[in-house]
Image (cartoon, rainbow, N blue to C red):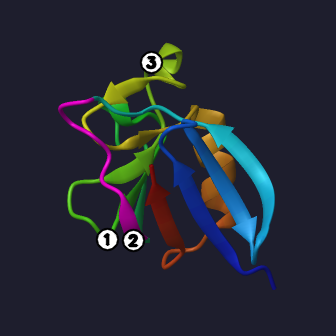
Amino acid sequence: MPQYRIIVDLSERQLYLLDGDTVTRGFPVGVGRMLTGTPTGEYTIINKQYNPGGPFGVLWMGLSKPHYGIHGTNDPSSIGHYVSHGCIRMYNEDVTALSALVPIGTRVTIRQ
C-alpha cells in the first residue's frame, strides 16, 4: 500500500506527490500573493468536498489549517502564478487525479 504525502514548493509553484521518499507525480499550482501568502508548515488533509462551486473548481481538499486548502479553479490561467488568498490552486483535472490517490489524513508539507 502506498505511503503518500504531499510537498508544496512555493518558490517553484509545484505540488509533489511522494510515495515514501520517492516523487511519483508533480503538478503546477497557483499559490498565495505577497499580501495573502500561502502558510508554510506541516498540515493534513481533513476533508474533501466535490463541486464546491465558484473559484474552487471541481474539488476542495481542506487542510488542518482553518480556511486553507488545495482546490481546483475556475481560472486555469492562474496556475503557475502568485494569485490566491493563500490556498493552493490546481487544474481541475489535476486536483481530481490527486484526490483519487490521497486519503483524508494525508500529510501536506508547504515549504518556501
Three-letter code, disc 1: Ser
Picture coordinates of residue 38, whole percent (x, y):
32, 46
Q: Earlier in the sequence, mark 1 or mark 3?
A: 1
Q: Secondary structure at mark 1?
A: loop
- Residue sitting at x 57%, y 34%: 92
Residue placed furthest toward the top: 77
46 sits left or right of 91 in the view: left
Judging by the rendered image, the residue that carries numbered circle 3 is 75
Residues at marks 1 and 2 touching, judged by CB atoms closer than 8 Å: yes
- Residue sitting at x 58%, y 73%: 103
Picture coordinates of residue 74, whole percent (x, y):
43, 23
Magenta segment, prevailing SS (helix, strand or loop): loop
Q: Is residue 109 above or below residue 90?
A: below
Whether residue 46 is visible here, answered yes or no, is no
Whether residue 31 is visible here, answered yes or no, is yes
Inter-mark Cα distance, 3 to 2: 26 Å
| Of labels 1 and 2, the one closer to you | 2
